[in-house]
Image (cartoon, rainbow, N blue to C red):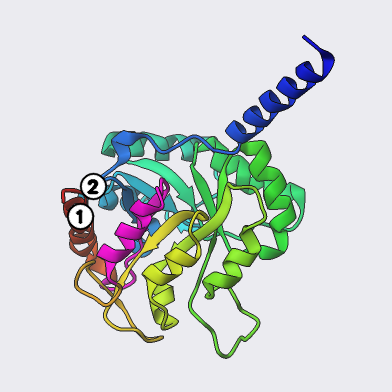
Amino acid sequence: MKIYQRLFLSTIASGLLLAGSAHATPIPEDCLTGGFAIGCQAWTFNRFSVIEAIDKTAAAGGKVIEFYSGQKFSPEHPDWKFGPDSSDAMVAEVEARLQKDGVRAVNYGVVGIPNDEAGARKVFDFAKKLNLYAITTESVESIDIIEKLVKEYDIRVGFHDHQRQPEHPNYKMWDPNYVLSVVKDRDVRIGSCADLGHWAQSNLKPADCLKILQGHIISVHLHDMNDFSPNGHDVPCGTGVCDIAACLTELKAQNFVGNISIEYEYNWDASVVDAAQTVGFVRGFGAK
């Protein structure tokens, strides 16, 4: 074989290896409901502990959970907080409860990722310890470090959107076009955590926003809202204005494989039934 042929084939092989490394381990198929990995964002149960949030996610029919930063650990230890500084014993207890309830931890956020490698690495080490699919953040200022660690750890990162903040005009994450500008030229494991409810509170149609971010959606925070306004509140999916069926159709068309986290920010003390109705909606959508 001529030298240039060997070099050509070597280059192709290296490219295939690099391309293959740009896709983190997928969420297992046994975590899917209606074709989607749907469960709860633990923030839905922020008046309870991590251990209780796992139980409530299972009770709602969710097969995955997204933890958030700083939730109290358990009814027995409400002063302990779950996160990167948690002990190995705390992590082991969480993993045991996940296994008992048949729930898989897939994501962590919304969490700040420091713009220094040592601080950022703590967040990624925690995610790796839990074998998470992704991390959710809004730390745009840390994008270069995030990209470096995404490649090293093979963990995805989704940039989250809160609602438009007229009193803070420098806040841009509400705009899917801005999020696209942040992620489009980065490693494919960096993209959007698409919060449908905050888009609706910004008077945007969630399905249209998903289309803008086509190919860049890492995860979804699933809401249906009672109206398009800054003061809109969550309602069970299929009963509000977000056209959840259109959103799921768009995600399916994009071959979306990330987690969908029900983030129900209403009826805080008794939201399991409402979350279960949302799981049922997704299950029914997948049965069409």
Please state the horizontal and vertical placement of residue 170, each as a whole percent of the image: 65, 82
Is disc 2 surrounded by few (<14), some (14 to 19) or many (20+) residues within 10 Å? some
| Labels 2 and 1 touching (C-beta < 8 A) | yes
| Viewer-side residue, 197 vs 204 | 204
What distance separates the C-alpha of mark 2 from that of mark 1?
Answer: 6 Å
Relative to residue 238, is residue 162 drawn left or right? right
Image coordinates of residue 259 in percent, x first then y, are: 40, 49
Q: Is residue 70 magenta?
A: no
Amino acid, disc 1 = Phe
Classify residue 22 by image quadrant.
top right
Q: Write down the residue under mark 1.
A: 285
Residue 9 versus residue 51 in the image, above or below: above
Residue range in magenta is 243-267
- At horizontal 68% and vertical 37% (from top left) the residue drawn is 152
Left-right relation of 273 to 32: left
Residue 258 sits inside the magenta stretch = yes
Q: How many marks?
A: 2
- In terms of secondary structure, where does tag 2 sit? loop
Relative height, residue 167 to residue 87 (above, below):
below
Name which of mark 2 and mark 1 comes first in the sequence. 2
Please identify the residue farthest to the top as the structure is shown: 1
Quadrant location of residue 20?
A: top right
